[in-house]
Structures are given as C-alpha cells and as structure tokens.
C-alpha cells in the first residue's frame, strides 16, 4: 500500500514561495488503478515525483508497505525505484543511442542482473508488447507508438509492483493510445498498482478511480468537475 | 548489457565533441613523448660517449675553444712539450696514461692529410720510473678496473679507443681507416712522408671520427719533420675513474697555470645542457597537458552533462544510484584518457624518430615504457578534469526526466 500522510511540497526561489502540493492525505491500496487529472501547474507531476521516491516532500511522510520512503538513504531509495516502481513517461525517455533491446535492459543492468538473463527477459518483454521484429532498432528508427511500447517493456523489466505513468497517451494517435491503455489495464489486472497522471479524460475513465488536483489540493472526483479542470 | 556498452555507444553517438577535447590531450602527450624520447636517447648518447672516452682530461693552450673531443688537437696554438715531463714527475695518483699530440695538416702525394705526432707511453714510463714518480698508480679507494697500457699486451690498433699507445718507433706510422683504404696501404707497407720512408705499423679500425683520416707518427719525428719545435697541441690524460678526473683538474691547473684544463664532462657540456633544456621543456609540456588538455576535457564533460541531463534523470528514475552515474562519467574519462595517451604516444614516437637526428643529432627509437607514462598521465588528467562534471551529474535532480529539456 502507498500512503501519503499530510504531504506538503513547497518550492522556494529567493523570497518567493510556491505551494505545489498542499496538505495531502491519500491511500492507494495494492492493485488500485488511480487516474489523477488536473490543469497544468496543479501539482500532478510533483505528486508523481514524490510518489516515485525522487523528490522529498517539504512536510509529511510517504509510506510504501508501511515504510517511510524518505527516511531511507539515497541508495536504498534508488533500489526501491529499481525493484518496486516502474515509470512511464509522456515522451518515453528512451536512450537514443541504444537499441530497443538495450533500452529494456537498462533497469536490469542497474539491478545488477547477469547479461544472459537481461537479454532473455528483454526479448520476452518486447515480444509481449508486439515488437518482435524491432529488437535491434534504435528509437529514431521506430514509430512513436513503437517507442512507447519499448518504454512499457522497459518499465516491466524488473517486474515492479507500482507503475507511475506521466501522461502516457499525451503524444499518441488514437489507435496507439488505445493499445497503450489496453496494456495498462492488462498490467493492472496482473495485480500491479497504477497511478496515472493525465489530461485525457477518456484515458482517466479506464482507471478504477479518478482524483482531481487543483492548486495543489486533491479536491473532487465528480465527472463534471473533471471536465472543467481537464 | 554492461556499463561499458552505454559508454561506448554514447561515444560513438557524439564523437565530435569528444574528439575535439581529445585532440588537446593527444597533442600535449605527443609533444611530451617526442621530447622525452629524444632526451632519453640524447642522454644515452652522452653517457655512451663518457663511458667510451673514460675519465679523460684534456690539457690545451689557453686560447683554444673546444667543440669536439676528437678534433681537440686540431688548432694552431701550442704548449711546450716539457709540460709532459712536469706531469709525469708531479706524482699525481690515478693517472693511467699521458698522451701528448701534435697535429700538423700536410699533404702526401698531393693528398691532404692530418699528420699527428704522438708520444708512446713507454717513453713517458721511462721518464717517470727514472724520477721515481707515482704515475700509473691508482688512488686510494678506487674501484675502477685497471686499464694501464702495458708493454706486453697492448696492440697499436687500440690507439683509437684508448687514446694512448704503448710503443711506436720513430720510423713507424699508424694509419687511420679512411686514409689506409684510400691509398691501398696495409701493415708492413712503406710510406714516404715529408721526404722520409716510414713503415706502416698498423691501420686503425674505422671510428667514424676525424681520426679515420689521420696519419699517426712518433711525436719527435713530426716535430723534426715539420720544424715545429718541442711543442704539442694537446696533452690527453687518462684517469682511472671519473672520481679522480675531477680532482686531477685542480691539481693540474696548479702545476700548469698557463694551460686550459677540461674534462670530458666539459666537452659534452653543450649536449648535456641541451638535454637539460629538453627535460625542462618536457615538464613545460606536462604543465600544458594538465592545463590545456584538462581544461578542454572539463569543458567537454560539463557540456556532455548538460546535454545528457534528461538521460541521466531517466537513469536515476529507473534506479541508478549517484555512484553509478559518477562511475559512468569517470569510466568514460578513463577510456578517453587511455585512447589519448596511446594515440599521443604513437604520434610522439614517430615524430621523435624523425626529429631526433635534426634536433639532438641522435637516432631515436620508440620507448615502450613511455606508453605507460603517457597513458597514465593522460588518464590522470582526464579523471581529474571529469571529476566535477561527474559529481554534477550525480547530483542532478532526477525529476528532470519529467521535463522537456
């Protein structure tokens, strides 16, 4: 279970102070599929960074399976991201000079898995996302949809329990968007927890529940409010 | 996949910036290796000369300037021959041989030749023995191998190397290799010299020096035939070791105040000073390597970190520790340093082989140990230059992976 306890995030620049996330309490049980929707600047990415053990909150605690994430030393937080959390980015963030196979192997390299296991698992995952004939292509040689599927395969490399997705369909055409959403639903059905930040209401509707963020506060999940905020 | 796959593929992806920064390191290492290579061979040459010539001391007329040991007697100024007797009777210890020479350019059968009068050691030994001098005795504590020319063994062919001769009759000559070859003369032949017949005692082996063109005869014969009087151009004194040579200079200067006394070390001083200058130059290039190569590498590394911010953020989001990111950049620095060092070594060695004969008059070959020194220094420079960029990369906020950069 992922819990936020009175989490507050404030960015300071000289005298100015911007509250990105105001006192927030949230519980995301195992196997949940949460969509977070809100306008630009509402704190969606900040929330995702905090949940992903990448940005410590100014106040409050984040608990993962009862353990306070930001009380862990930096190397253990990195290990947490390696083994328990998978990221999906809006612009995929593939390493441009590595092939699809090599991109998928990165999380396994970081987890110090041996080369043979890395290659076997990377191939399996790429076949799973329908890229059997694109294993040794670089990102520039792939379509946008194929790139996002490589990113999904990479995200699954270390079999994470939690998936954090930042606008996963933001750059995709309707057909590819549908493919990606189907994959996310499939991953959720496999028992993974998904937290997805999106502007896309149709994508948000695929989640089990939807939260709205406005000016750093989780305020509503009514459909009309969502339409207004999105 | 291993970390080196990421490093190698990234280098291949962005080669231009790295080649530019490597160029400064390659050029500096090239200069360093080339200068060091030439210097080492030049020092070997000097050491070889000193070793070959032994602990020699030259006694010359005051006004003579000395450029080359082998032509030290080729000048028109003279000193009295009686200085030889003064030296022989002075009781100086550690002297192995005294060899006075008189050099007179002349022509034989229309060919120019350097006629050199030399006094055999037997004549000097007789003089010293008669007076009870201490000549040809080693000094206290001397560990040098005894090298005294003796009446039994020493062949006249050894003149070129020993710079002294045991026996030479007044009607005998010894020919330099070139002169003998040009005139088709061999031991036992006769030669007419300034109106008198001489028997060829031997011919000297080729030495590559001015000695190859000389005709050596007894000093007193040359003095008589050329009407030079009882004078010599030079007195060569062979000490038993380098330790005694330096001490001999001050003692001889006291005995012969109107002469100029130099050691072999003085003769090769010019080359030694060139070597010293080249050593200093190599230190200068080392400083340039550190400054220019390091600054260039640091600048390229900082630019590389800025260019790869999003990639680094993504790696951190995927679980890379700051240590992994630091290693990624430092391992790349080691690879570049090694490549720069080896490339600089190869280019520098080739350059040294071409420039050695022009700059230091020595032939130069590559020195494999310099490859280790060159790559070691280059790696150290690239590591130090990349340390702060690597730290900067490892301290990046991983949240940058969510932004468009």
Image: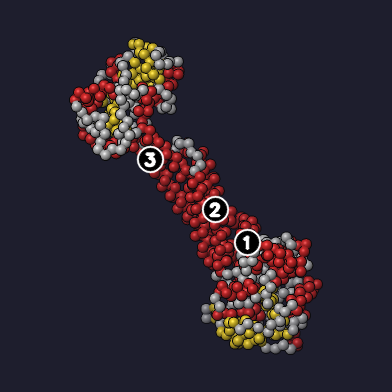
What residue sits right under mark 3 in the picture?
Answer: B272
Which element carries disc 2, helix, strand or loop?
helix
Quadrant housing residue B86 = top left
Gap between marks 2 and 1 measured at Cα: 19 Å
What residue sits right under mark 1 in the picture?
Answer: B2
User: Which residue is depicted at the point 75% across and 87% down?
Assistant: A223
Which element carries disc 1, helix, strand or loop?
loop
Which element carries disc 3, helix, strand or loop?
helix
Q: Pointer 3 indicates a residue of which chain? A: B
Q: Nearer the viewer, mark 3 or mark 2?
A: 2
Quadrant housing residue B337 = bottom right
Gap between marks 3 and 1 measured at Cα: 52 Å
What residue sits right under mark 2 in the picture?
Answer: B338
Crowd class of label 1 (few under 14; some 14 to 19; many from 20; radius 10 Å): some
Gap between marks 3 and 2 measured at Cα: 33 Å
User: Which residue is depicted at the point 37% across and 31% down?
Assistant: B68
Q: Pointer 2 indicates a residue of which chain? A: B
Work out which residue is located at the far left of the displayed protein and give it.
B131
């Amino acid at each position: 279970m992922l819990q936020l306890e009175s989490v507050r995030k404030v960015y300071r620049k000289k005298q100015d102070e911007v509250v990105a996330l105001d006192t927030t309490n949230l519980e995301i049980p195992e196997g949940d599929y949460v969509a977070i929707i809100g306008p630009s600047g509402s704190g969606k990415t900040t929330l995702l960074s905090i949940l992903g053990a990448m940005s410590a909150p100014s106040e409050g605690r984040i608990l993962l399976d009862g353990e306070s994430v930001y009380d862990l030393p930096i190397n253990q937080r990195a290990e947490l991201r390696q083994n328990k959390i998978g990221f999906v980015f809006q612009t995929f963030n593939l390493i441009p000079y590595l092939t699809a196979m090599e991109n998928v192997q990165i999380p396994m390299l970081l987890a110090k898995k041996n080369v043979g296991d890395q290659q076997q698992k990377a191939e399996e995952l790429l076949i799973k996302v329908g890229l059997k004939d694109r294993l040794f292509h670089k990102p520039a040689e792939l379509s946008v949809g194929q790139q996002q599927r490589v990113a999904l395969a990479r995200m699954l490399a270390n079999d994470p329990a939690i998936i954090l997705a930042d606008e996963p369909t933001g750059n995709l055409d309707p057909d590819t968007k549908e493919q990606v959403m189907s994959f996310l639903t499939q991953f959720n059905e496999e028992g993974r927890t998904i937290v997805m930040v999106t502007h896309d209401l149709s994508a948000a509707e695929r989640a089990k529940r939807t939260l709205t963020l406005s000016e750093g506060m989780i305020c509503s999940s009514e459909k009309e409010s969502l339409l207004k905020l999105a | 996949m291993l970390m080196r796959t990421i490093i190698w593929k990234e280098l291949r992806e962005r080669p231009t910036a790295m080649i530019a920064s490597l160029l400064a390191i390659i050029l500096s290492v090239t200069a360093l290796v080339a200068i060091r290579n030439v210097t080492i061979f030049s020092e070997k040459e000097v050491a070889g000369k000193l070793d070959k010539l032994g602990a020699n001391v030259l006694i010359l007329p005051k006004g003579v300037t000395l450029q080359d040991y082998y032509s030290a007697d080729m000048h028109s100024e003279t000193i009295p021959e009686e200085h030889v007797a003064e030296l022989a009777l002075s009781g100086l210890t550690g002297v192995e041989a005294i060899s006075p020479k008189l050099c007179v350019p002349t022509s034989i059968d229309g060919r120019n030749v350097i006629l050199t009068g030399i006094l055999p050691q037997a004549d000097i030994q007789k003089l010293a023995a008669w007076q009870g001098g201490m000549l040809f005795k080693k000094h206290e504590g001397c560990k040098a191998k005894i090298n005294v020319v003796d009446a039994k063994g020493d062949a006249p062919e050894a003149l070129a190397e020993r710079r002294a001769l045991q026996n030479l009759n007044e009607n005998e000559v010894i020919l330099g290799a070139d002169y003998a070859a040009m005139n088709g003369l061999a031991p036992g032949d006769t030669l007419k010299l300034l109106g008198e017949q001489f028997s060829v005692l031997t011919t000297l082996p080729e030495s590559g020096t001015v000695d190859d063109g000389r005709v050596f005869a007894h000093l007193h014969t040359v003095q008589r035939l050329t009407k030079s009087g009882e004078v010599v151009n030079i007195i060569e004194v062979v000490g038993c070791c380098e330790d005694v040579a330096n001490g001999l200079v001050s003692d001889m200067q006291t005995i012969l105040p109107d002469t100029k006394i130099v050691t072999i070390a003085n003769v090769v001083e010019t080359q030694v000073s060139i070597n010293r200058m080249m050593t200093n130059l190599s230190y200068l290039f080392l400083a340039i390597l550190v400054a220019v190569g390091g600054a260039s590498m640091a600048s390229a590394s900082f630019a590389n970190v800025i260019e790869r911010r999003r990639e680094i953020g993504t790696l951190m989001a995927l679980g890379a520790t700051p240590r992994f990111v630091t290693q990624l950049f430092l391992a790349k620095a080691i690879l570049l340093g090694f490549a720069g060092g080896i490339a600089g070594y190869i280019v520098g060695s080739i350059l040294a082989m071409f420039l050695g004969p022009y700059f230091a008059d020595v032939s130069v070959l590559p020195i494999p140990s310099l490859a280790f020194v060159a790559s070691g220094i280059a790696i150290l420079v690239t590591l130090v230059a990349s340390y702060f960029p690597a730290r900067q990369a490892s301290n990046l906020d991983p949240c940058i992976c969510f932004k468009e950069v």
